[in-house]
Image (cartoon, rainbow, N blue to C red):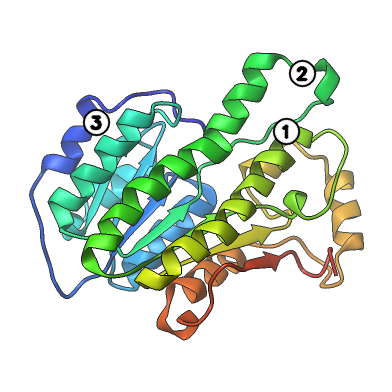
Amino acid sequence: MLMNQKVGAASRDLDQGRVRDATRNVAVVSGGSRGLGAELVSGFLDRRYAVATLSRTKTAFIEQLLRRPRAKNFCWSAVDARDDEALRRFVAEIVERFGRIDVLVNNLGIAVEGVLPTMRAPDIVEAVQVNLTSALVLSQACSRAMLRQGGGCIVNISSVNAVRGHAGVAVYSAAKAGLDGLTRSLARELGPRNIRVNSVAPGYFESEMVKGMTDEQKQRIVRRTPLGRLARAEDVANAVYFLASPQASFITGQVLIVDGGVTC
């Protein structure tokens, strides 16, 4: 999801109160206003996490969460994913408000299609900034907080396009493959300090990114899928919850593909 606003008036939502509840873990989900991001925000809240997210606009989903009686455990800010300093300020505000960061889910992403020789250079740069560079910046900022507190977990939302090539998505595939490379190297860097890093690579699932497909295109994907359907957002989210949980305490540096068997 592309962010087109810098930290501004909306960041006041972060300042509604400084809350430090030692009984709650804290999850940061980038791109949490709709789709998979919204599913992850809701799921972590249901699991009694305090949750912080950023997105381009304050959607109805975000408005609803901010009006909840227990909104003190949730905060949102508008951040431009291409603004490294705004991303760092966002993380600093989360640490100030909640005192720690236990889980980072790098979910920011935009779908980019086009044959590479004909693509505009600004579109290529923007795709890499949103899909990869923002994750690098957020991982750096959040891992510093995790190092101070003695541990944490990072989950990158990659794609099966990073695993298997498809025409017309070279830039998107390159950025998502970069996330998987980040996962493996960062797992080695941070593992000795009790910080785990993994990727979840979804196949096609019902989301903004497939809304432009025709029913025929979707059915072709379904026919190629051994489990015979597109994924649901909760299928992908469940993989994230597992990797963030104590049940995955000895798993790091891995890419978990959630595609119904397309790449098997």
Q: Contact (CB < 8 A) between labels 3 and 1?
A: no
Can you give x and y, in whole percent of width and height, for residue 79 in the image? 35, 31
Indicate whether 203 appears above or below 166.
below
Is any atom of residue 193 visible in this view? yes
Position of 162 with respect to 215 (left or right) is left
Q: Contact (CB < 8 A) between labels 1 and 2?
A: yes
Can you give x and y, in whole percent of width and height, for residue 260 in the image? 77, 69
Crowd around label 3: few <14 · some 14–19 · many ≥20 (10 Å): some
Q: Where is mark 3, residue-wise? A: 10
Q: Residue at x 41, y 50 (%)?
A: 139
Amino acid type indicated by mark 3: Ala
Can you give x and y, in whole percent of width and height, for residue 151 in the image? 32, 70
Quadrant in which the C terminus is drawn: bottom right
Most foreground residue, 3 or 251:
251
Q: Where is mark 1, residue-wise? A: 171
Amino acid type indicated by mark 2: Met
Is any atom of residue 211 visible in this view? no
Label whose residue precedes the other's in the sequence (2 or 3): 3
Q: Residue at x 25, y 36 (%)?
A: 89
Residue depth check, mark 2 versus mark 3: number of the one nearer the observer:
2
Label whose residue precedes the other's in the sequence (1 or 2): 2
Residue depth check, mark 3 versus mark 1: number of the one nearer the observer:
1
Can you give x and y, in whole percent of width and height, for residue 98 in the image? 16, 57
Most foreground residue, 231 or 127:
127
Image mark for residue 119: 2
